[in-house]
Amino acid sequence: MAVASGSRIDRETLREHLVRTRIAGEVATSREANLANFRLMVARDPGYQFGLRLRDWTFDETLAMMARLCGVSPDPGHTHGVDTIDPDRTIDALDVMAARIAHAARTRCTVLFATGHPATLMGVYRAVAAKLTAAGCRIPTPAANWSYASTTDGLKYREITYTSGVAALVSRTGDYRHTHDPQPMQAMLSELHGTGTWPDLVMADHGWAGAAAEAGIETVGFADCNDPALFAAHAEGKLTTTVPLDDGILPTHYQPLTTYLLARAGLT
């Protein structure tokens, strides 16, 4: 059953939507890809650390942690085929995220927004940023147009841009680019340091979230089942919550999730 974007959505309706669209449940990310990326995080590959200084994780610990926080299969013998994200874990984490967003609105916090998945998740961030702006929160846009050569993307030119207060990366031609890099968030925080404006909360993903959490800022984020670093940071107490979801679904499919999140935060 399709969910109207403007309607209020209860937990069970959202759960059905997440499974039907494969945001959660049986997801498109393969078991092979998940296990490969778990090993990359364990090996401390920079592209899978997201700017975090994590403790030493073994593969077995990582698999058990991802089963607990994300809902992948805990069976080490399951090495091929379909893997899963538990939709109930997704919704539980959304509830925690909503509580932090509600607190930010009540106290008129300073909040940073950033995404490494602008092609798919930008709408979620923009909707929350708009509601918090209306509630009187400050949404700074530091390091706009800051550029660098991405070390995890073949030393290609990348530049910070903002859309409705949400940071993302673009190429030299202005196209949105996916990224795992922590350097852009580090540049944003470096510019804010000493200005009297410091984020109380960051809502982000990938390296944007990892760098913020590593800087000691309260951070809530999204992560796919093949991105274990943010879940590990959550397990270590560095992130307030990590919402497990497939981050590569059609953007319109995230609208019911956004509607639920805003309603739970009291921002409808």
Image: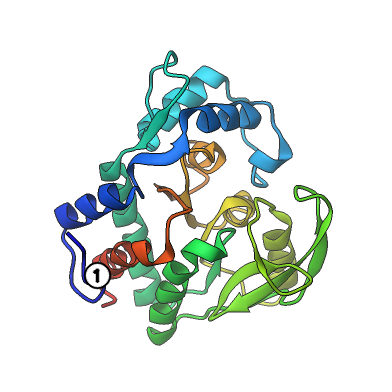
| Above or below for 268 versus 26 | below
Residue placed at 55% from the left, 59% from the top? Answer: 117
- The spot of residue 66 in percent (x, y) is 44, 31
| Quarter that holds the C terminus | bottom left
x, y percent for residue 209: 57, 54
Residue occupying the point 65% across, 30% down: 40
Q: Residues within 10 Å of mark 1 (few under 14, many from 20)?
A: some
268 left or right, relative to 182: left
Q: Quadrant of residue 13?
A: bottom left
Residue 194 showing in the rendered view: no
Is residue 212 toward the left or the right of residue 21 in the image?
A: right
- Count the marks: 1
Residue that carries the numbered disc 1 in the rendered image: 263
Q: Type of residue at label 1? A: Ala
As drawn, is 34 to the left or to the right of 149?
A: left
In what element is the residue under mark 1?
Answer: helix
Most foreground residue, 14 or 81 = 81
* Residue at 61% in and 70% down: 167
Residue ranking furthest to the top: 77
Q: Quadrant of residue 134?
A: bottom left
